[in-house]
Image (cartoon, grey):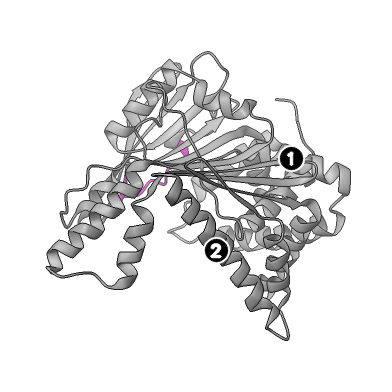
């Protein structure tokens, strides 16, 4: 596969993107088509490593991140040394055979001699999308509801090349507490399960790898048996979820909270109130009042050579609720600015926070509360150094 990006730019952008996400909260939307793998999920968190790399390389080509890249290179050198020390210890608990296979495969694919660099470059070159999704069961007030909800959790990795090096038989450690079973193996479909044992308790994680319909892209899905089977089947029937996002120029992050999320929170609060047989405290009542007027929440981040563009859209129950959220948000921003102005010595991160707040726009559009903001390449540079200063302390 031809190299789309320079290796150093990819390495740097992986660090820069991670740093930026420490100060950016994000939520996004997924398709509702019946063939969409995530149509039944109430929470969908999507990001595209390949799109991050493309945007990052464009930024680096235009503005240059020489000092930042040098800083990342030094950090990667240290990480490689620590990893090699761990490998050289010959600890019986260290999966040396699997580690050696995996690192050699990554090095062969990327041409990188460094294990850490090979991993990062492979991730930002071959992974089109990472999707964490949650399918919520109907709230029933049971004590094990949280456990049942976790069964609806899934992780999907979308590759732009066949991930043949990820043979689970070669990368899963051979231990008594980890049992691997391949349940089906065909040309474009592999399924299996991992049984994990700990102190007499067992947990089973199912997985499936499949070629996505009509495109040279592949998905690996982890989750419960039914969830994996459903998503694999839908990936075989439609490629719209992935194609739509990759065709959206500059989209690096898109996430959604659907109506069911907010309905479940309200039901849980009402259930707690009923069990107590008395009114909740003012804080919980306020939370319920806010949440019960929310219908959906979507947040996207797009990137190009000039930085990031963030867009938030919150659908509410009515225009009055939407205006209340606008007033609340505008008031919170004003309060934050006023509080900062009263301080004699602002920290660097506080000054930067005020700078970001100045770029936030908040409006109401019918029943929707909307907000958007831009983060320039120079501001991304500031985020990088602010985060580094915190790590170095």
Image-based side of 33 in relation to 274, left or right: right
Image-based side of 142 in relation to 5, left or right: left
Find disc 1 in the rendering and name its residue. Answer: 55
Main SS of the magenta segment?
loop
Q: Position of residue 53 (x, y in %)?
A: 71, 40
* Residue at 70% from the left image edge and 67% from the top image edge: 354
User: From what the image shows, is residue 72 above or below residue 281?
Assistant: above
From mark 2 to mark 1, how far is it between C-alphas?
40 Å
* Residue at 33% from the left image edge and 27% from the top image edge: 230
Quarter occupied by the N terminus: top right
Q: Secondary structure at mark 2?
A: loop
* Residue at 34% from the left image edge and 59% from the top image edge: 289
Identify the mark at residue 306; answer none if there is no mark.
none
Query: Which numbered disc flags the more N-terminal residue, 2 or 1?
Result: 1
Q: Nearer the viewer, residue 193 or 235?
A: 235
Q: Position of residue 211 (x, y in %)?
A: 48, 20
User: From what the image shows, is residue 329 above or below residue 212?
Assistant: below
Q: How many marks?
A: 2
Outermost residue, top side: 214
Q: Nearer the viewer, residue 65 or 175?
A: 65
Q: Nearer the viewer, residue 346 or 176?
A: 346
Q: Could one spot residue 153 in this view of the protein?
A: no
Find disc 2 in the rendering and name its residue. Answer: 89
Residue 188 belongs to magenta span: no
Residues packed near mark 2 inside 10 Å, few (<14), some (14 to 19) or many (20 plus): few
Residue 176 belongs to magenta span: yes
What residue range appears in magenta?
A: 170-178
Q: Position of residue 37 (x, y in %)?
A: 41, 28
Q: Secondary structure at mark 1?
A: helix
């Amino acid at each position: 596969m031809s190299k789309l990006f320079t290796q150093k730019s990819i390495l740097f952008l992986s660090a820069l993107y991670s740093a930026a996400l420490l100060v950016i909260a994000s939520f996004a939307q997924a398709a509702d088509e019946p063939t969409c793998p995530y149509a039944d999920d109430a929470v969908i968190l999507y990001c595209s490593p390949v799109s991050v790399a493309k945007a990052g390389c464009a930024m680096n080509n235009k503005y240059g991140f020489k000092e930042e890249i040098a800083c990342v290179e030094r950090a990667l050198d240290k990480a490689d040394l620590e990893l090699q020390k761990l490998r050289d210890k010959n600890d019986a608990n260290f999966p040396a055979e699997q580690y050696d296979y995996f690192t050699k495969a990554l090095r062969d694919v990327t041409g990188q001699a460094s294990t850490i660099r090979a991993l990062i470059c492979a991730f930002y070159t071959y992974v089109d999308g990472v999707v964490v999704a949650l399918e919520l069961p109907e709230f029933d007030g049971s004590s094990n509801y949280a456990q049942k909800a976790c069964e609806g959790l899934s992780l999907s990795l979308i590759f732009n090349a066949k991930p043949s090096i990820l043979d689970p038989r070669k990368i899963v450690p051979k231990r008594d507490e980890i049992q691997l079973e391949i349940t089906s193996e065909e040309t474009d479909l592999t399924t299996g399960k991992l049984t994990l044992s700990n102190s007499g308790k067992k947990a089973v994680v199912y997985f499936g790898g499949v070629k996505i319909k009509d495109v040279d892209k592949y998905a690996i899905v982890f989750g419960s048996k039914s969830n994996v089977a459903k998503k694999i089947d839908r990936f075989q029937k439609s490629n719209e979820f992935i194609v739509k996002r990759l065709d959206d120029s500059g989209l690096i992050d898109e996430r959604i909270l659907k109506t069911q999320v907010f309905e479940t929170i309200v039901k849980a609060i009402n259930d707690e109130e009923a069990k107590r047989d008395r009114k909740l405290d003012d804080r919980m009542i306020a939370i319920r009042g806010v949440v019960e007027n929310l219908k959906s929440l979507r947040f996207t981040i797009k990137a190009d050579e000039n930085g990031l563009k963030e867009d938030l859209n919150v659908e509410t129950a009515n225009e009055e609720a939407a205006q209340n959220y606008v007033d609340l948000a505008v008031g919170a921003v004003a309060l934050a600015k006023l509080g900062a102005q009263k301080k004699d010595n602002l920290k660097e991160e506080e000054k930067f926070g005020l700078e970001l707040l100045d770029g936030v726009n908040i409006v109401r559009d019918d029943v929707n509360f909307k907000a958007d903001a831009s983060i320039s390449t120079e501001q991304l540079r500031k985020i990088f150094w602010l985060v580094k200063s915190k790590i170095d302390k």
